[in-house]
């Protein structure tokens, strides 16, 4: 019979298939061997010497690196098309791990699946209003190595350096009165999205531990207004704030609300310096002879020729749809 290894979803375990990462919550790891996604032949006979090991990601298959293990013959009989086994009372440190499948009592990996255990001591908080961020290590016994470092990443991004949004040496965290350690970024200014903080040992890119995710949301500014009339083929941006002072390289982009900030998603754009003042003293800009095929739209304001959203309008729709 051909079968595939994956981590299952239980009340205490959040997991995905072999092609994705996963997380452990609580103190149980459930492993399933799924017969509905064929990729490997297994043997659960009484004399089978196939086995499963749990390792830190990046560690070799040496026996000294095994964190947990079991014979495949210990798996439960098929239930809903799967064999399964539960490691109970697990107390592994936070970090990234792999479940590896071996045949015939060897150390040759036949198939493997990654999962991660989120840190209970490493966390982050982000202020959209102040564009600031705190990294917190809530551990009175925390003692970083000189070359340990902490990076901020998009939730699903790999550990590659190009994906680092913010970073610090762990030794630069400051001890607080309550015994925790903290670092404050004054100008974090992250684009909207879901992020995690990852802790690395000795200047490597192997995740030692990782925080729960946190979200950065776009600020919705009631003073940033848009109207669009497809019959007139006209879209108007208006900044209803008399204190508005655009920098030369600030710009406005028109997007569908669900789209990312990627340049390919921009419907229309204008430099902020090209806005004009109306009779009330408010800045505005008219796009004429434009034909946008979208039900709803959103204005986003960017600073210094970047794609980091400073603020955004509430969504608005084609005027003719209001009639």
Image (tube, rainbow, N blue to C red):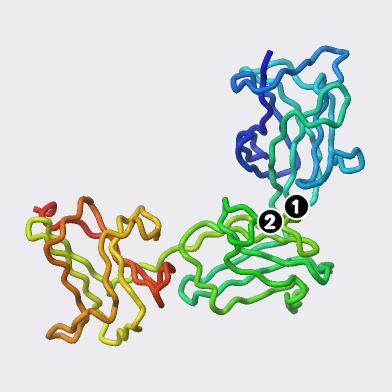
- Total count of labels: 2
The quadrant in which the N terminus is found is top right
**Callout 2: 10 Å neighbours few (<14), some, many (20+)?**
many
Direction right: furthest residue: 64
Q: Earlier in the sequence, mark 2 or mark 1?
A: 1
Is residue 225 positioned above or below 78 on the image? below
As measured in the structure, the alpha-carbon distance from the residue carrying label 2 to the one carrying label 1 is 7 Å
Residues at circles 2 and 1 in contact by the CB criterion of under 8 Å? yes
Query: Relative to the observer, which residue lies in front, 303 or 132?
Result: 303
Residue in the picture at 72% in, 30% down: 111
* Residue 312 in the image, given as x and y percentages of width and height: 34, 67
Residue in the picture at 71% in, 44% down: 26
Q: Which mark is residue 210?
A: 2
Which image quadrant is residue 240 in? bottom left
The residue tagged 1 is 94
Is residue 12 positioned above or below 46 on the image? below
* Residue 81 in the image, given as x and y percentages of width and height: 62, 17
Residue in the picture at 50% in, 72% down: 189
24 left or right, relative to 165: right
Is residue 151 positioned above or below 68 on the image? below
80 left or right, relative to 222: right
- Helix, strand or loop at mark 2: strand
Which image quadrant is residue 6 in? top right
144 left or right, relative to 297: right
* Residue 289 in the image, given as x and y percentages of width and height: 12, 62
Q: Which mark is residue 155?
A: none
- Helix, strand or loop at mark 1: loop
* Residue 243 in the image, given as x and y percentages of width and height: 30, 87
Residue in the picture at 36% in, 54% down: 259
């Amino acid at each position: 019979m051909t079968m595939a290894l994956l981590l299952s979803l239980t009340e205490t375990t959040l997991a995905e298939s072999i092609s994705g990462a996963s997380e452990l919550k609580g103190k149980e790891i459930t492993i399933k061997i799924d017969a509905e996604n064929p990729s490997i032949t297994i043997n659960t006979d009484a004399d089978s010497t196939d086995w499963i090991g749990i390792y830190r990601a990046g560690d070799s298959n040496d026996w000294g690196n095994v964190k947990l293990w079991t014979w495949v013959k210990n798996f439960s009989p098929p239930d809903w098309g799967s064999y399964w086994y539960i490691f109970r009372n697990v107390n592994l440190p936070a970090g990234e791990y792999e479940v590896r499948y071996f045949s015939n009592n060897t150390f040759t990996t036949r198939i493997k699946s990654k999962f991660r255990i989120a840190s209970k001591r490493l966390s982050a908080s982000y202020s959209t209003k102040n564009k600031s961020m705190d990294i917190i290590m809530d551990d009175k016994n925390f003692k970083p190595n000189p070359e340990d470092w902490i990076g901020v990443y998009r939730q699903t991004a790999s550990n590659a350096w190009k994906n680092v949004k913010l970073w610090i040496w762990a030794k630069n965290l400051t001890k607080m009165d309550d015994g925790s350690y903290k670092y404050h970024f004054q100008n974090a200014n992250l684009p909207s999205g879901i992020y995690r903080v990852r802790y690395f040992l000795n200047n490597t890119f192997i995740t030692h531990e990782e925080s729960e995710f946190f979200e950065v949301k776009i600020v919705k500014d009631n003073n940033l207004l848009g109207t669009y009339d497809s019959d007139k083929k006209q879209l108007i941006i208006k900044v209803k704030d008399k204190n508005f002072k655009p920098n030369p390289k600030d710009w406005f982009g028109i997007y569908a609300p669900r789209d990312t900030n990627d340049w390919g998603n921009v419907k229309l754009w204008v430099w902020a310096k090209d806005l004009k003042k109306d009779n009330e003293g408010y800045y505005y800009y008219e796009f004429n002879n434009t034909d946008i095929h979208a039900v709803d739209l959103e204005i986003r304001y960017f600073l210094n020729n970047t794609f980091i959203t400073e603020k955004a309008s509430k969504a608005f729709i084609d005027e003719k749809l209001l009639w």
